């Protein structure tokens, strides 16, 4: 008998109603557990060996260490909840070693690249489209928002801070206040006054809306940023703005803890990766501009 699906449903109900996880996280957990259930016996009979074999099969299928680790994390949390719910007494996933994930540094743009992107990314667009693109790019760069967070911002989230801050709905339903620089604030106001209602007459309360009055989709924002990158002859994604924001903040002396708060990271260890990016940027600068590095 396979792993009972009603246990999975109970766990999923808990994480979305009690823990308030994001929809993307919920969907990921659901898919991972459904795949695991197909390969597992009933919950009372699952052992460490079953889980290890499941991971081995993922390796054989060419799944990345990051994907393996995500599945194992989901399985651990599921069994932890089953213990709390008195369904089982031991977590069979507790002592399974996590796959080693190779460290990859997030790519950040240099100041010159970002300046060119902000100034030339909207070339060939009409006036209103150019103003909107400028507002999107400057908001991402000034705040380090996730794209999913940008799509949920309303006019009131901007106006209630008198244009100096944004109220942001982060992961797990946690709100935070993020400061805006004068340039980004001015650009957003210009967009609201001269572009937003012309491009999307039925935009409702959303700051960046689609044509049907819904929030602009992540895919659409990605497309707009990618097209802007093509005009400047280099690749960039909306998430690249987040990496660049964090790197440039640290390079200019901002406290790591403050960057953590602005990015909405729960664990400061997640933010510390940008100190490595900062070191890489310093090395690039030295090798590029120092006379003794050009031999």
Image: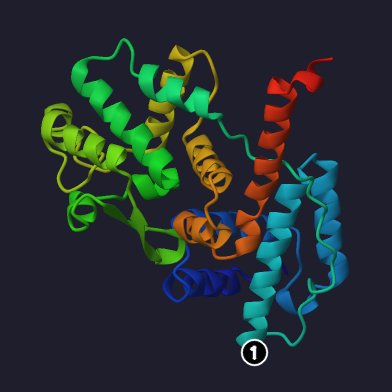
Q: Residue at x 70, y 21 (%)?
A: 288
Tell me how the rendering is colored: rainbow
Circle 1 residues within 10 Å: few <14, some 14–19, many ≥20: few
Q: Quadrant of residue 212?
A: top left
Q: Nearer the viewer, residue 240 or 12?
A: 240
Q: Residue at x 80, y 57 (%)?
A: 54
- Above or below, 19 relative to 136: below
- Above or below, 244 relative to 148: above
Q: Is residue 284 left or right of residue 199?
A: right
Q: Is residue 66 left or right of residue 232?
A: right
Q: Quadrant of the N terminus?
A: bottom right
Specify whether residue 174 is in view.
yes
Q: Quadrant of residue 198?
A: top left
Q: Quadrant of the C terminus?
A: top right
- Above or below, 225 relative to 126: below
Q: Residue furthest top?
A: 124
User: Residue 96 in the image: x percent, y percent?
Assistant: 84, 67
Residue at mark 1: 86
Q: Residue at x 37, y 62 (%)?
A: 176
Q: Nearer the viewer, residue 30 or 204?
A: 204
Q: Nearer the viewer, residue 20 or 185?
A: 185
User: Residue 169 in the image: x percent, y percent?
Assistant: 36, 58
Q: Quadrant of residue 102?
A: top right
Numbered disc total: 1
């Amino acid at each position: 008998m396979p792993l009972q699906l009603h246990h999975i449903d109970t766990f999923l109900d808990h994480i979305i109603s009690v823990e308030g996880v994001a929809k993307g996280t919920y969907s990921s957990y659901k898919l991972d557990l459904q795949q695991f259930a197909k390969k597992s016996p009933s919950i009372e009979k699952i052992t460490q060996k079953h889980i290890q074999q499941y991971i081995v099969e993922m390796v054989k299928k060419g799944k990345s260490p990051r994907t393996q680790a995500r599945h194992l994390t989901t399985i651990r949390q599921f069994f932890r909840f089953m213990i709390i719910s008195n369904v089982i007494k031991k977590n069979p996933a507790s002592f399974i070693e996590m796959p080693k994930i190779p460290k990859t540094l997030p790519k950040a743009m240099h100041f010159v690249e970002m300046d060119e992107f902000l100034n030339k990314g909207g070339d060939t667009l009409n006036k209103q489209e150019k103003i909107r693109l400028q507002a999107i790019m400057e908001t991402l760069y000034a705040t380090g928002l996730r794209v999913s967070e940008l799509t949920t911002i309303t006019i009131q989230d901007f106006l209630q801070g008198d244009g100096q801050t944004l109220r942001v709905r982060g992961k797990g339903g946690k709100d935070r206040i993020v400061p805006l620089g004068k340039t980004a604030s001015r650009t957003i106001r210009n967009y609201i006054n001269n572009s937003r209602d012309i491009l999307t007459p039925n935009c409702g309360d959303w700051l960046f809306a689609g044509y049907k009055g819904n929030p602009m989709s992540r895919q659409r924002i990605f497309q707009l940023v990618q097209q802007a990158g093509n005009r400047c002859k280099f690749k960039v994604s909306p998430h690249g703005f987040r990496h660049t924001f964090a790197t440039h903040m640290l390079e200019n002396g901002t406290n790591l803890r403050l960057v953590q708060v602005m990015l909405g990271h729960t664990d400061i260890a997640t933010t510390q990766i940008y100190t490595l990016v900062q070191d890489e940027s310093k090395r690039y600068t030295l090798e590029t501009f120092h006379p003794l590095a050009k031999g």
